[in-house]
Image (spheres, coloured by chain):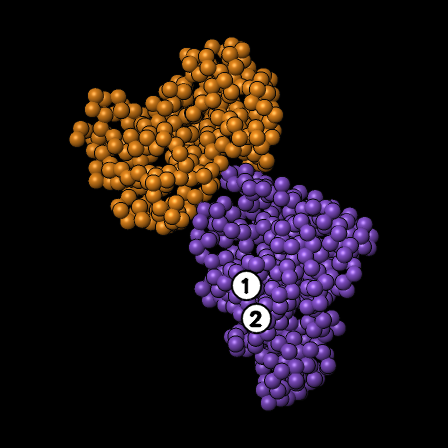
Amino acid sequence: MSGELVIRGGRVLDQHGERMADVLVRDGVVAEVGEGLSATRELDAAGCIVTPGFVDLHTHLREPGMEEAETVETGARAAALGGYTAVVAMPNTDPPIDSASTARHVLDLGRSAPCDVHVAGAVTVGRRGSALAPMAELHALGVRIFTDDGDCVADARLMRRALEYARSLPGAVIAQHAEDASLVDGGHMHEGAWSSRLGIPGRPAEAESTIVARDIALARLTGGRLHVLHASTAATVALLREARAEGVAVSAEVTPHHLVLTDAACAAYDPAFKVNPPLRTSDHVGALRAGLADGTIAAVATDHAPHPPETKDQPFSEAPPGMLGLETAFAVVLTELVAPGVLDLARAVAAFTWEPAAVGGLEAHGRPVAPGEPANLAVVDPDAAWEVEPSALASRARNTPWAGRKLAGRVRHTILFGEAVVVDGEAER
Amino acid sequence: MKHLLGIADLDRAEIEGILDLAESFLEVTQREIAKVPALRGRTVASVFYEDSTRTRLSFEGAAKRLSADTLTFTPKASSVSKGESLRDTVQTIEAMGADAMVVRHPSAGAPHRVADWVDASVVNAGDGWHEHPTQALIDTFTLRRHRGASLDGLRVGIVGDVAHSRVARSNVAAMTALGASVTLVGPPTLMPPNLDGWPVTVADDLDAVLADLDVVSLLRIQRERQEQSLFPSLREYTARWGLTAERAARLRSDVLVMHPGPMNRGVEIADAVADSPASLVTEQVANGVAVRMAVLYQLLGSGAASGGAPANGTGSEA
């Protein structure tokens, strides 16, 4: 909340459209948006877009319990460098975030972080899929997303109860990792031509779509809100489109890697490309892109999943699934989707900002760049070219699938409640 | 050729080069003193993360007949139980002087990872469900000795658990590269889920295709497949896809029967069929050493750089 600064010469892009303007920030809020503004501190934004700060609905910060992979501090710094002003930390920690005390612990760790750290709570006690976690106790701490992410809530009756109970908690949403465990058991990549050729046990697309179909039916039955995590199949997009047209309260997110990469990336057995749900074929990629473009899929989320190097330095089937994403997400979408004309820039910004903020009930984020609004902002140079170098990432881990990839679009500044936490691509804290 | 990771990486000429080389080494194995100095001073390590005494002994026999030194890594007696990673293990073995590593591992692609981590040549001795390239070289070598240098037009049926079989994947690649046509036969539950790009035909009725085959190659059925409900019972499997004596009696007299071993007699192959004149099973094992000598020589010998044919000089006695 320190003093005042002006972001000068950028193109402001938010839910009210697009205009060239300076943005004056004072005492944590946007004070003025217009021409020729000045302040004691100036951040250059010439050639840049100025948007609400990004919101990641799906971040694994690994703390507590897996600090060798990531901590709240390192993960939040990676997020800030990626233009994020808010992340939702997933509860599959050790212990899992299934109680107020663990949630409070992670929230406390986040208070000094260069990004607003929210937490998701587990749906079930211990993420064991048998009994509801104390959702109201978590809700009182601000938790809005409940998920056993990493595992699917398999029991249909329990999923029904979770959706039903969530109706009594304003803003609460049940977020499902939709993979039928019995269909993916023992599988390590998408089941298809590549898995058949490579001899790697597969995870069929239907493992996701059968759960999504079931959960949509349960959301319709209960009136509870459902969010589909990391959508990865064409059938999922079709089911979402139909359910949303019908008025079922269901939203979805998609990751940059599922929007760009295919199962062919696994051909050299490099576990950097191992992730759940797995990378699929170009048909699925095409459907996900269309779903994101037409709003069927609300948000881009990273599923940022750090793993220590020694765990990925193994044979494919022995390495854990997951990929880094925070520092590359927006640049990947700009480079691979916006530049070729697959997605327009305004829709991309929406999917990184106000859409995920609405899904997760993050009221201070994804707001218009307008006087009186919280000053959570990202300033991105869409033309800045760079190459992803794993060792240069702020995340503690190195498991990026984008190593060596040339991207266009770099986050220049990130403003968190009025404070410049990233300036000229460098973290300030 | 630096590594042998899979048949899918080889073209017809490369496969034929190895098989031609194996012919000259087969002659060596039949000598009174079956040993040549071709790889004297070189070290071949066997790194076997799965029990396979037969494959390991075959490779070690091949290395010894080429006068190479051998190192054997047996996981149970070593540091795997202490949690040492595959990477650390193979780098340690390389530091002990291994010029080549023969790697058997339950995970598909593990030898490919090893090849990234060490400078030594890597031979895939079976990786998960993926490939078992030397077995396919042995099988095609054995067929060539019966049917001439080319397998053009030969009709091969590969019968059984194709989905979980590295032998099947390697044999499809090797046999079709050499001109054979391959039919995969078995229950739909034991076929790979997606065969796009495979140069094969698929049948689920063995009796319907039996008359059109010149070679019947049977795959081992593991008992755990029954527990996974991939078929109702071994009895039902044998009734529909086993090469029973009754089915064997309907084969033309010149049809050849193959099995990479170890066999489940009475399940995928009847006892009498395994021991019949049509069976190449013992010959496959016998040819294994010569073929593996050819592979090791190709990777480590004087012909390694050029990938050239065997110098006759390698045949001189030590």
Chain A visual colour: purple
**On residue A63, which mark appears?**
1
Q: Position of residue A277 (x, y in %)?
A: 60, 50
Residue A109 badge: 2
Q: Kindly identify the amino acid type of the residue bearing the numbered disc 1.
A: Glu
Please state if A363 lies on the left or on the right of A302 as rendered: right
Residue B73, image x, y percentages: 33, 40
Residue at 56 percent of width and 34 percent of height: B192
Asked whether A213 or B209 is in front, the reply is A213
Residue at 52% of width from left, 33% of height from top? B164
The quadrant of the picture occupied by the N terminus of chain A is bottom right
The residue depicted at 57 percent of the width and 75 percent of the height is A112
Residue B297 in which image quadrant: top left
User: Quick check: marks 1 and 2 in contact, CB under 8 Å?
Assistant: yes
| Amino acid type, callout 2 | Leu
**What is the crowding at mark 1: few (fewer than 14 residues within 10 Å), some, or many (at least 20)?**
many
Q: Colour of chain B?
A: orange
